[in-house]
Amino acid sequence: MFTGIIEEIGAVESAQAGRLTISARLVLEDAKLGDSIAVNGACLTVVKLDNEAFSVDIVPETVRRTTLGELRAGSPVNLERAISIGGRFGGHFVQGHIDAAGKIVSRTPHAEAVLMKFSAPGEVTRYIVEKGFVALDGVSLTVTERTADSFSISLIPFTAEHTTLGRRRVGDKVNIEVDILAKYVEQLSRRDGSAINAAFLAEHGFLAGS
């Protein structure tokens, strides 16, 4: 589990079939084999490391759903270690499970910030709500506007400087993870909904004979 608060920007040292090697500093301070590190929002397991870099394996499903397969040597990536017990929680619950890739369709300066609009599949935007959370390349952000096939966020200068989003341009792809709470609510409201409602009514004396 992650928070969506990026700790540092790393750089891809090598991108081979099924494996990425990434140079970093901060996330390696207490890293060990088997740890989880979010790379552009995707939760990956450390399989090799030294004092200056770590390696992760990426399976076909990850390549299919994310932009990680497009990374090349020199590509900057957002990095975040898994949540530590007792640490501050500044973003929102981010699983590191990417739902789909979206595309930047516009960047508009707005005072000190930049309004960024993204296109996304309908099966993703259905879970996105105005003023709700979304993680883009692992960055926890607040949705400012949403349509059936797009949504917008406001990128403040600090986030632009300390994540890769400040370097993204129109046409670039980003990894999207929606708020998991929206998925749970939908599933619970659909599965056995009639039985749940009937049980609730009976328990509270609203059904005949109860």
Image (cartoon, rainbow, N blue to C red):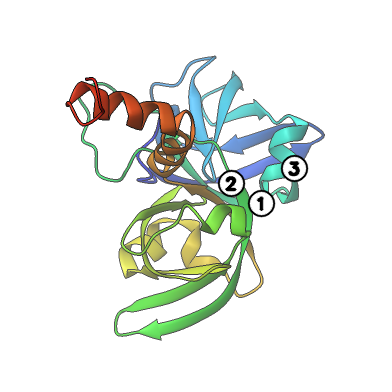
User: Mark 3 — residue?
Assistant: 64
Pointer 2 and pointer 3: residues touching (CB < 8 Å)? no
Q: What residue type is labelled 1?
A: Gly
User: Mark 1 — residue?
Assistant: 74
| Label 3 residue SS | helix
Quadrant position of residue 197: top left
Pointer 3 and pointer 1: residues touching (CB < 8 Å)? no
Residue 15 rendering spot, x and y as whole percentages: 75, 40
Q: Is residue 74 above or below residue 148?
A: above
Pointer 2 and pointer 1: residues touching (CB < 8 Å)? yes
Q: Nearer the viewer, residue 145 or 197?
A: 197
Q: Nearer the viewer, residue 16 or 4?
A: 4
Q: What residue type is labelled 2?
A: Ala
Q: Is residue 165 above or below residue 193?
A: below
Q: Residue at x 54, y 69 (%)?
A: 150
Q: Residue furthest front?
A: 209
| Label 2 residue SS | strand
The answer for how far apart the CA atoms under marks 3 and 1 are is: 21 Å
Q: Residue at x 60, y 37 (%)?
A: 22
The answer for how far apart the CA atoms under marks 2 and 1 are is: 6 Å
User: Considering only order in the chain, which callout, 1 or 3, is on the residue closer to the N terminus?
Assistant: 3
Location of the C terminus (image quadrant): top left
User: Mark 2 — residue?
Assistant: 11
Q: Residue at x 39, y 39 (%)?
A: 185
Q: Which residue is drawn at 40% across and 84% down?
A: 109
